[in-house]
Image (cartoon, helix red, strand yellow):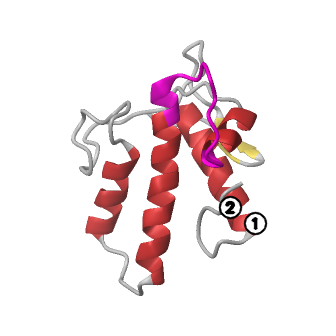
Amino acid sequence: MRTLGFGGSQAATRRCFLEAHHTTHIEGAKLSLDESERLLAGEAVPGADLEDVRELLNYRDAFDFVSAWLGSGRPITEGLVQEIHRRLVDRVRGGFAAPGEYRRLWTRACSLEGEPSRRIQRGTTGRHPA
């Protein structure tokens, strides 16, 4: 797999890969772990949804951008966070909804059946207070 993330270590690359894969799934992408890994390595995945591919590759581009930013010694700023968001949603789901701006409405993750996600963090469960 092509190096991703901060420091370029194999562990950092794996964490960034899993973050990209699972976060795009929250947004509705259907790529398998294998397909995601192949795409991030620069391989073609025939039959993959083009929006799913673009969304995953946006994560790779955002990781590269942040890694270069941090490597330059520049501070983490609100503008940086907004630019990361713009890059993540470029030409994909959510790209029409004010890229780089804060969400003004609540959102929550649900299962395919519409049930609220119950998992809060590894090892704990609960529900959103809303």
Q: Give the vertical position of 80 relative to 95 (above or below).
A: below
Q: Which residues are magenta?
A: 40-53
| Residue 1, x across and y down, in percent | 72, 54
Q: Residue furthest bottom?
A: 73
Q: Secondary structure at mark 2?
A: helix
Left or right: residue 61 compared with residue 18: left
Q: Secondary structure at mark 1?
A: helix
Q: Can residue 129 be seen here?
A: no
Please, what is the three-letter code of the amino acid marked with disc 1?
A: Gln
Q: Can residue 55 be seen here?
A: yes
Q: Which residue is mark 2?
A: 13
Main secondary structure found in the magenta portion: loop
| Residue 92, x across and y down, in percent | 37, 33
Tell me, yes or no, whether the two marked residues, 1 and 2, touch with CB atoms within 8 Å. yes
Residue at image location 31% in from the left, 73% down from the top: 77
116 or 113, which lies in front? 113
**Label ID, residue 31:** none
Please, what is the three-letter code of the amino acid marked with disc 2?
A: Thr
| Residue 68, x across and y down, in percent | 45, 74
Q: Give the vertical position of 25 relative to 3 (above or below).
A: above
Q: Quadrant of the C terminus?
A: top left
Q: Which residue is mark 1?
A: 10
